[in-house]
Image: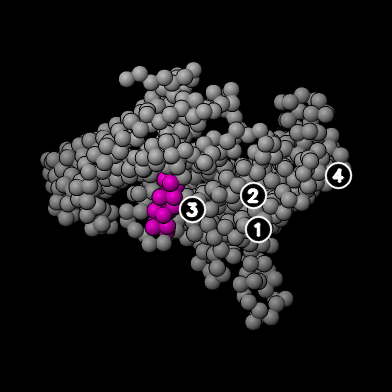
Amino acid sequence: MTMSLGPYASFIVTSYAAAALVVAILIGWVMLDHRSQTQRLRELEQRGITRRSGRSATDPR
Amino acid sequence: MAVAGGDCFPNRWKPSMTALAALIRRDIRIALRVGGGALIGVLFFLTVVVLMPFAVGPDLALLSRLGPAILWLGALLASLLTLDRLFMADHEDGSLDLITMSRTPLELACAAKALAHWLAAGLPLIVATPVLGLLLNLDMVATAAVALTLLAGTPALTFTGMIGAALAVTLHRGGLLMAVLVLPLSIPVLIFGVAASQAVIVGPMTFGAPFSILCALSLVSLVIGPFAAAASLRHGLD
Amino acid sequence: MTLIDLANPTRFLALTARVLPWLAAATIILLTIGLYQAALAPDDYQQGATVKIMFIHVPNAWLSMFVWGVMSIASLGTLVWRHPLADVAAKAAAPIGAAFTFLALLTGSLWGRPMWGTYWEWDARLTSVLILFLMYLGLMALWRAVDDPSRAARAAAVLTLVGAINLPIIKFSVDWWNTLHQPASVMRMGGSALDKSFLIPLLVMAVAFTLLFVTLHLAAMRNEILRRRVRSLQMMQASRIAFSSEVAVGSREDNASKEAGAA
């Protein structure tokens, strides 16, 4: 599929690429943050620090 | 220290009014005494305005064209930077807790403190404006216009900045962070203040429209400022 | 008292775990449809192919305001109802909103280059978005400046609400200022009378980006709740170590002294 983007193709491509990049960074940040928080919770649990309710902290209940 | 003025009113006359008057008198007295910091604001204003010619060159025509903008920026920075410690000193010596606990509504107490601050730190800026206008080659009418817009606009700056001061005291942070938070909120005041002054000097448009919007902004901030500051103090000090 | 024992965040986590995959799937599907339609959309007779930038610029500009609205509602939740999830919602939304605002600025500037000949024009809309971006950054700085999350939450809530009241005033002033300095010749981006061939992809993209925000926001809120759990567990650990080392002064218990040494 060829799409003619006219004389300003680079601007269009750049803005779409920038949007994709920023969204990718956001998704990556959210996922990495989730991983590191659950990791830290698990470590704390292994050291015997538990929540008062006794449930696992990583458990979404 | 805060009881003065109680005896000239009969007791049934709303006690909160006398409390507010006492608060205003106390704050002004503290601000004006040595080390109070109100007059340093004027000195800062003077210094900023004196710096400008070194940045843009001693071209008098250019300076008189930029004059209102320079004066407004200087006044904006001076009145916001002196606000930093509006609640901080009271918090340190404990009187802020007394003010929060007293029967006087906290919103009114905040408004009184801001009014006192404006009287002690804002009015001197306006008094200094004619002198600085002279340095910037502004004529009589232009200087009067700038002074008038400052008179109408600086209350808005004080009452908006008070929100930042209240946040500063609840967060134990001050200075740059608060300036960064409050300065964007003062953009409308700057726009209409400078526009009204420019309208007198060059502008094709009338002085009335931007000036009345500027007054409206001051009135709006007179309402929002005390409520937001009181909310911040009430939620933040416990 | 610890935040983690409140029932609401816990129930929220369960809900999030169930809803997130569906939201992510819906976002991907809508984004694909939107991008496909945007690619098929005809060129504008005036702006040529650059009109394609609109399909990401406008959704981001819309989100930049929408996210502040979400944060304002959350701030009301913090100050008025003291809802435990409200400050989590407000805190999680700020960086995402800032990212979308940044994209709105960037794409606006890239769209403006062919139109105006410069990357930055003090155009009324771009200027208001720039001020909004500054306010997002200030708010994020406020969140980072304070250690105690609930104290930061209340300060941020006050600032968010003041910002919400001020934003229309700022928008109005900047519009006024702009017409004062650039009479008549202002290039109007977009315009109100959009052709259907532009409007439908634009709407799809706007909905897709909004869904993207909701997904990211829920995920970030989940992370924030977990972060607070980590924080309170660490504080529990610290207090336990302090307590047990006090006890261990007499009994010289092996484990306690090791833990105290590690801390």
First to last magenta residue range: C66-79
- Do labels 1 and 4 touch, CB within 8 Å? no
Q: Chain of mark 3?
A: C
Which three-letter amino acid code belongs to the residue tagged 1? Leu
Q: Residues within 10 Å of mark 3 (few under 14, many from 20)?
A: many
Q: Is residue B93 left or right of residue B19?
A: left
Work out whether residue B43 or residue A30 is closer to the camera in this orientation and state it.
Answer: A30
Query: What residue type is disc 4 on?
Result: Val
Query: What crowding class fits label 1: few (fewer than 14 Cα within 10 Å), some (14-19), or many (20 or more)?
Result: some
Q: Mark 3 is on which residue type?
A: Leu
Most extreme residue toward the right is B140
Would you name the residue on which mark 4 appears?
B141
**Image quarter hosting the C terminus of chain B:** bottom left
Question: x, y (%) of residue C181?
Answer: 69, 36
Per the rendering, the mark at residue B219 is 1
Do discs 1 and 4 belong to a common subunit?
Answer: yes
The mark found on residue C161 in the picture is 3
Q: Chain of mark 1?
A: B
Taking C220 as reference, is B33 left or right?
Answer: right
Q: Nearer the viewer, mark 3 or mark 2?
A: 3
- Magenta segment includes C120: no
Rendered image: mark on residue B157: 2
Mark 4 nearby-residue class (10 Å; few <14, some 14–19, many ≥20): few
